[in-house]
Image (cartoon, coloured by chain):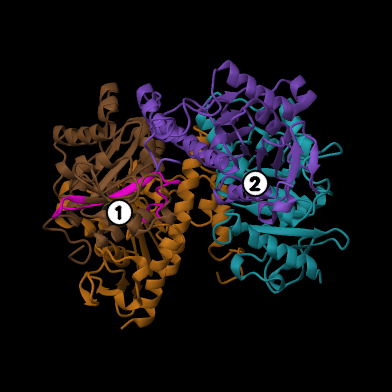
Chain colours: A brown, B orange, C purple, D cyan
């Protein structure tokens, strides 16, 4: 079942090491078929260069395995919560990519310092708090998903224009319309995190980019009046 | 038309990922034929490894497309302004290369800390301010070009001896006698930006290199008394 | 003798440059056969790409060469002390990998700032002091081993859950159940050291990750209740 | 003439980009034949991947070209001065490698923070001052050589145990018994410079490694009582 989606998810997972986002097995990609309500996700702890489409695991939105000989990623329940709360998304990525994870470890949201960030992410990338001890004990991965969703609501963030989040002391999640788009955003986030770190080192009194510049670049690429690319990007 | 120039511009664009200056489609190279007054530029949002000479777009200096099936780079109007104001240049590069962009995000000009910089760029690399809201709303890309040109005039900078600029909260533009030379200067700028960042971390009280050393290295490579290289470099 | 182990140790040594952990000959891997009480170790100063299984040196736990045409690694006596004191380990790695060595040069233990660290190493990676002049003069490499062992006892660290140490002004040692596992931990340590450095730069008031999060991630992967991976990882 | 030496020098020059020490043509290697008093050096401004042994230039110790169709490196006179003053050396390298050059731009000598440094370089790597305006005007490259030699005398540094120097606001020179050994030391210097930078970031109150540890590591590898390697390294 979902053979086409399995291929795409397998390929997206294999793109993680290609883009330098993962060491060993430290990351996973999933994609959802909204019609049947199942998503396809990487098996837990299997190396990327050995992954085949048949190794992918099919799970429903209640985290029940539907098909597959392997255990799904240990982060599966977080993926499920995001799919349920963010109806526009079709793919999710979790990594421990170096710079994004370092911001998460530092417990800081990434300010928008320039157009590289503004081209893809509207405003800062929020860093959500650590889970409390009870939340960890009760259902760690699921509660991670709840927390992200609740924080996006509280901050009035639109998950389409802010396709990334940092979990404090842990690492980033990114998403997109499909698996490939979510990986694209993971690459963007890592480079944005790197440049924000460097820019702060170069100017200790740095300020975010002016709002009008952020708007210009975001809306140059997104929405009805976009004019970047070839029209259907 | 301009088949030879298209080949050179295509190759120069494909050199951007080779030199590690771009992620995805984040950069563009153009070159001008001063005889006919047209320039050739990368199509917007197309990936480098798929670029062919036929994909290149021909544009006139008023930003009107003359030939090509694709939309030209969204930064085309900035290129045009630079070509009109700087008569000695024949190629332009825009990237979001990591270190140069980080200096731009920090809003700082890059001081000349050593001979690696002085060999190619005379004095500091200026960082021009963000556009004001009205300038952005009116004609963002064209006004970016105007601002660079006006700042070079105000600072009495010669675009031949200072073939690079940073746009605050955005990123670098470099130029040269042709597309290849402009890419060369983009590589130089990125390495110079990296070393300046590191040198400031190593010595918080760092000063620019003495003027006589900057002069020596610049004029060892450039102008009538140059003696670096094999005579025609 | 120990032909199979020699192959594994040779391969593990050759993995060091593959993972970017060594320059020239700056690192060595060994593995112990607890039945016969001999261990196999890299020859001193031989380049990785020329190493063959037959070049490996067999040594007993008193540092006496049992077989091999080369001198064993100059760090052999440190390996022997660790094998004697830590009965659960079967492989040891020493490198001068960039970030781990920089923490060692800084003389600081690496705090646990996030789950990347907590997934593999329980609590901070200790940095043991420099040897005193007499300890160096008497038996430098052997006393390095003694010091590590004594510090682990004094700090009540379990070498299975803390498979890494830094020697001040020198560099890291890691270990594991076999040579491959020890190399795995050397890669983890290097990435953890890099992220801890970056996280401190991003937040000068950073605190270690909450203990309950560290516990959750460590025990999600290790021990009786682990649920990461496919069950036998 | 000197065909064998030309091959070695050509290969050593081509190793510079392989080890990541140079961008474009920013570095040169030479080697001296002490019997005939000539040295072989890279031609100025020629790219490494096009270099052949026949392109190498033969020069005498008064900087007169003896053979070759190209101009020799513009740094030739510095090489000559070092060969004349340091009778034990047979090869010299100049690069603009990133970290070593950043220390030079910062105008700081590199302290010995650990055994990676002490294994190859005895004590700190000195950074010599910029030339004065008259010294630059008179004979820049030759006076750079004089300054290095004079500073080594003044500081009582032995060029055999300290095979590296930084020239303020410029970059590093390294040397060795032959071209290959000089390149080896250029790689060591770059890694040592990188780790010293990182170690200072990690501990703002860092101190050099204890002298007895520096001695132990240096003499474990060098001199009559060395026991690292296979005896003739």
Q: Is residue B153 left or right of residue B61?
A: right
- How busy is the neighbourhood of tag 1: few (under 14 within 10 Å), some, or many (20 plus)? many
Q: Quadrant of residue B60?
A: bottom left
Q: Which mark is residue A184?
A: 1
Query: Residue A33 or D40: which is nearer the viewer?
Result: A33
Subunit that carries the residue with mark 1: A
* Furthest residue toward bottom: B1
Residue A36, quarter of the rendered image: bottom left
Q: Is residue A207 or residue B87 the one in the foreground? A: A207
The spot of residue B149 in percent (x, y) is: 31, 57
A56 lies above or below C37: below
Q: Is residue A26 magenta?
A: yes
Asked if the magenta segment contains residue A143, the reply would be no
Q: For residue A195, which numbered disc appears in the image?
A: none
- Residue C223 % position (x, y): 44, 30
Name the quarter where the C terminus of chain B is drawn.
bottom right
What secondary structure is found at the residue carrying circle 1?
Answer: helix
Bin the neighbour count of mark 2 within 10 Å (Cα to Cα): few under 14, some 14-19, many 20 and up. Answer: many
Q: Which residues are magenta?
A: A15-38
* Label 2: chain letter: C
- Residue labelled with disc 2: C9
Front in this rendered view, residue A95 or A77: A77
- Secondary structure of the residue carrying numbered label 2: helix
**Is residue B129 rendered to the left or right of residue D169?**
left
The image shows residue A31 at horizontal and vertical percentages of: 24, 52
């Amino acid at each position: 079942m979902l053979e086409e989606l399995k291929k795409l998810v397998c390929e997206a997972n294999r793109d993680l090491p290609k883009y330098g986002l993962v060491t060993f097995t430290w990351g996973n990609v999933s994609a959802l078929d909204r019609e049947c309500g199942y998503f396809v996700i990487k098996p837990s702890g299997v190396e990327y260069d050995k992954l085949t489409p048949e190794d992918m695991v099919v799970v429903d939105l209640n985290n029940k395995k539907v098909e597959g000989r392997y255990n799904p990623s240990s982060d599966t329940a977080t993926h499920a919560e995001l799919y349920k709360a963010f109806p526009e998304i079709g793919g999710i990525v979790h990594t421990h990519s170096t710079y994004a994870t370092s911001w998460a470890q530092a417990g800081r949201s990434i300010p928008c310092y320039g157009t590289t960030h503004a081209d893809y992410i509207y405003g800062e990338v929020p860093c959500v708090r650590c889970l409390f001890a009870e939340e960890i004990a009760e259902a760690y991965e699921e509660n991670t998903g709840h927390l992200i969703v609740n924080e996006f609501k509280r901050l009035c963030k639109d998950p389409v224009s802010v396709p990334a989040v940092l979990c404090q002391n842990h690492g980033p999640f990114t998403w997109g319309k499909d698996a490939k788009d979510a990986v694209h955003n993971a690459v963007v986030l890592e480079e944005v995190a790197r440049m924000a770190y460097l820019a702060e080192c170069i100017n200790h009194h740095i300020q975010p980019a002016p709002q009008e510049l952020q708007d210009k670049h975001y809306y140059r690429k997104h929405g009805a009046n976009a004019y970047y690319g070839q029209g259907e990007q």
